[in-house]
Amino acid sequence: DNCKSSIVDLHRSCSKCSYDLCLSCCQEIRNGNLPGRKGPVPAKYNRRGGAYIQICRPISAAVRHSVATKSAIIGSTLAQRWKPNGNGGIPCPPNGLGGCANHNLDLKCIFPSKWMSELEESAEETACSYDFPEVSDPSIQCPFCFSIGSKFFEMGKQLRKAADREGSDDNYLYCPTKDDIQEEDVEHFQKHWMRGQPVIVHDVLQDTTELSWDPLTMLRTICEKNGNRLRSDMKIVKATDCLDWCE
């Protein structure tokens, strides 16, 4: 709730108001650095010109400066009251910073305490239950591509040049068509897939009918099939552009 960053697992949270604080902000507070209060960061606004301003209601520069100054003073005053306890605990911040200032922030985790050990155990059981094919040494050149490369000009569409490194065996990517990946070529596809190498499959949409990934075509199709429902759900809402202080 302070730095607006994503919390993966461990964090501190208030049991009363559910205020969350990441571990990085906790460390900054204990070091005497108020998190997120190191001074104003100048913002760069995109000037969209007169045509944009004519359809909006811009706020004057004096009002912008007054609001920004007032917010900075209030935030700085409240942040000075947010300090760690003598035992290292971190209290909930004041009301003006989003907290309740009545409880300490307890260390919590999103996942269960045994989540990691259970995940490792489940992965081990899965690995022992299936007979995975052996992955060949990635440093060894693919035998299929080597045979194709020897007659590259005859089968050029199955290889695409991606680099020009001297003495390298992986300057080309396997680039088959949809029709090339049949039963006899699945093994070749799997060879690259198991090595984590990219495979480019082209001409996929060539034989399909009435299928297009063009955004306008997709939007038109959606509107035709769900026109009545979309019209009833559409509402006019007010949107605020924070970068240009207009709505």
Image (spheres, rainbow, N blue to C red):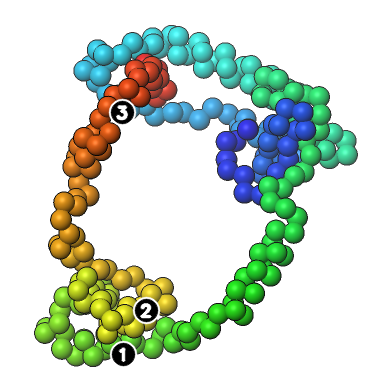
How many C-alpha atoms fall within 10 Å of the one at disc 2: few (<14), some, or many (≥20)? Answer: some
Locate residue 14: give its quadrant. Answer: top right
Disc 1 to disc 3, C-alpha distance: 54 Å
Q: Nearer the viewer, mark 1 or mark 3?
A: 3
| Residue ID for mark 3 | 230
Disc 2 to disc 1, C-alpha distance: 13 Å
Q: Nearer the viewer, mark 3 or mark 2?
A: 3
Q: Is residue 84 above or below residue 233?
A: below
Disc 3 to disc 2, C-alpha distance: 43 Å
| Residue ID for mark 1 | 143
Q: Disc 2 marks which amino acid?
A: Gln
At mark 2, the secondary structure is helix
| Residue ID for mark 2 | 190
At mark 1, the secondary structure is helix
Locate residue 91: give its quadrant. Answer: top right
Q: Position of residue 179 (x, y in %)?
A: 19, 74
Foreground of the two, 122 or 52: 122
Q: Position of residue 53 (x, y in %)?
A: 27, 15
- Point out the tag, 1 or 3, that comes first from the N-terminus: 1
Contact (Cβ within 8 Å) of mark 2 with mark 1: no
In what quadrant of the picture does the C terminus appear? top left
Contact (Cβ within 8 Å) of mark 3 with mark 2: no
**Seen in the image, is 87 located left or right of residue 63?**
right
Q: Is residue 43 above or below residue 215?
A: above
Contact (Cβ within 8 Å) of mark 1 with mark 3: no
In what quadrant of the picture does the N terminus appear? top right
Q: Position of residue 205 (x, y in %)?
A: 19, 60
**Seen in the image, is 87 located left or right of residue 223?**
right
